[in-house]
Image (cartoon, rainbow, N blue to C red):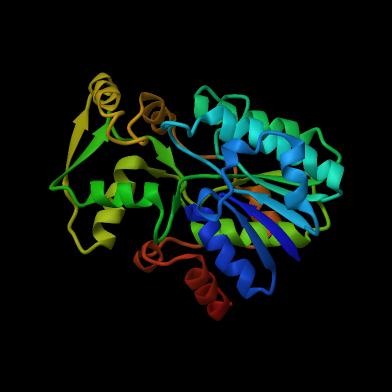
Amino acid sequence: MNILLTGASGFISQNLGQVLTAAGHHVVPVSRRDGGDFSALQTVERWLPRLRGMDAVINAVGIIGETGSQRFHALHVAAPIALFDACCEAGVARVIQISALGADDSAFSAYHLSKKAADDHLRQLDLDWFVLRPSVIYGRGGTSAEMFMRLARLPVLPVIGDGRQRLQPVHIGDVVATVMACLTARETRRTLDIVGNEKIEYVEWLQRLRLAQGGNRALVLRLPVRLVMLGAGLGQPLSPMLRPENIRMLIEGYHADGRPWRDFLGRPAMAFSPALLHADAPQALTQLGGQA
């Protein structure tokens, strides 16, 4: 298949691109690195030339925080909506939108609301669409995964409040495997929450990451929510990850019913192991195939 892949320089797309190419697909990347500024592609007319000859589109553009010209509305709403409408006009029926867990009717953050806006628009179109909503993704090269691993290496583990927020981390290999299945699935027009098999408390997730990196269980420093929110506000100029809204998202947790997704994929999520922390999608899926 000829596949247009947006956000091609990002964590998810880099893993996707490798697996798609290895499977014999021809991938056409769209990213600033490839001369395609997503924020400048906000009309159908700008997308149509890029869709000639395409069999499928995968939109994997996403930012966790706004910086400079990288704004939620442009990247998560305007450009994707223009792309989806262009797919209708160009006759590219298979469209896979990589959204985020929490981009639903309970969404409150600018991040989730912007993702949901594009998801909702796609779901109204006469296309063979999929909306994929992954939980916290771990694996080699992931920004959030690296952040959690650095936190886990600290002498004392800092947590928000009691640290009992529930997560269902999922490996990048499972996200990529889902996209691959979506490309050939007969039943389309589905929204799938991609989550790990177990719900784990945030503090225990950090302890698990610490043990996986060769450390011992550490003491826990429980920080008041107000103090963490203040620190996040002050730290915004230093990192797009340090946003009060991101802290609120973590407090709410990242968990969902994964049964519809597991039924679609035909297997459970990969069980966590220390080796998976340092594995990318091609490595993890190769290992999984060897175990099957």
Q: Residue furthest bottom?
A: 290
Task: Classify residue 85 as left or right of residue 11.
Answer: right
Residue at the image position 69 percent from the left and 69 percent from the top: 25
In the image shown, does 285 or 14 lie closer to the viewer? Answer: 14
Residue at the image position 65 percent from the left and 36 percent from the top: 79
Residue at the image position 24 percent from the left and 25 percent from the top: 231
Task: Classify residue 245 as left or right of residue 281.
Answer: left
Task: Classify residue 100 as left or right of residue 141.
Answer: right
Q: Is residue 165 above or below residue 291?
A: above
Q: Quadrant of the C terminus?
A: bottom right
| Residue 76 coordinates in the image, percent (x, y) | 59, 34
| Residue 258 coordinates in the image, percent (x, y) | 60, 47
| Residue 281 coordinates in the image, percent (x, y) | 51, 65
Residue at the image position 61 percent from the left and 74 percent from the top: 22
Q: Is residue 215 above or below residue 257?
A: below
- In which quadrant of the rendered view does residue 82 lie? top right
In the image shown, does 232 or 25 lie closer to the viewer? Answer: 25
